[in-house]
Image: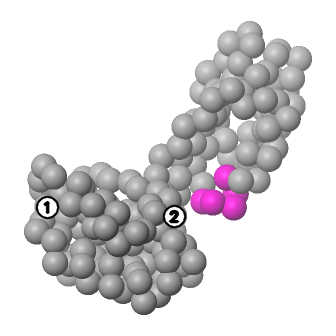
Amino acid sequence: MKHTISVLVENTAGVLSRITGLFSRRGFNIDSLAVGITDNPDISRVTIVADGNEHDVEQLAKQLNKLVDVIKVQSLDQEQLISRELWLVKISCTPDKLSELKNITEVTGAKIIDVTPETVTLEISDWGAKLMNFKALIEPFGILEMVRTGVVAIERGAGGIGRK
């Protein structure tokens, strides 16, 4: 089962290496990893998506809490999180297909960010299932290149890892 783990850390050199090393030593494959500073420039938030059972994730959270520079660890409940991932996708698209592509972007919320006579580059930010639906719609054009960020996630409502 996929688990999303949010980790607040001191913004210091080597902290990401220690976190990923812990996952590696425990035999966890990281599906997604995103890191960014918070509203406090001395603190970063690491969002990790990985496969594992509940017991393994609990053990991993305990081990993460023992690492130097780790402030707080929270396993986010899949039902109580809002997550997003950003994709940039370059596809084959001639001018005669552009109107069809514009219809797809209107329905999916994607944006056209670059157009050449042979290609169009699109930007979309959404959650997993919607992104996969978007990909299915644009695959017939021919995907030339695609880059993705890691998943970022936040807990719904008043709670959250950053709350005191």
Please name the amino acid that badge 1 sits on. Answer: Glu
Q: Residue at x 78, y 29 (%)?
A: 142
Residue to which mark 1 is pinned: 10
Q: Is residue 51 left or right of residue 56?
A: right
* Disc ID at residue 159: none
Which residue is rendered at x = 46% and y = 63% of the image? 29
Residue type for callout 2: Ser
Q: Nearer the viewer, residue 29 or 139?
A: 29
In front: 77, or 30? Answer: 30
The magenta span reads: 127-131
- Residue 130 in the magenta stretch? The answer is yes
The extreme top residue here reads 117
* Residue at image coords 35%, 72%: 26
Q: Position of residue 50 (x, y in %)?
A: 47, 68
User: Of label 2 and label 1, which has the lower sequence position?
Assistant: 1
Neighbourhood count class around disc 2 (C-alpha, 10 Å): few under 14, some 14–19, many 20 upward: some
Q: Quadrant of residue 79?
A: bottom right
**Where does residue 116 sit, x and y in percent of width and height?**
68, 12
Residue 145, horizontal then vertical, whole percent? 63, 29
Question: Residue at (12%, 66%) from the top-left corner?
Answer: 69
Determine the main secondary structure of the stretch shown in magenta. helix
Res. 26 in view: yes
Percent of width and height locating residue 7: 29, 69
Q: CA distance from mark 2 to mark 1?
A: 23 Å
In the rendered structure, the answer to whether residue 140 lies left or right of residue 12 reads right
Q: Which residue is mark 2?
A: 83
**Considering depth in this image, is 34 or 66 the residue closer to the camera?**
66
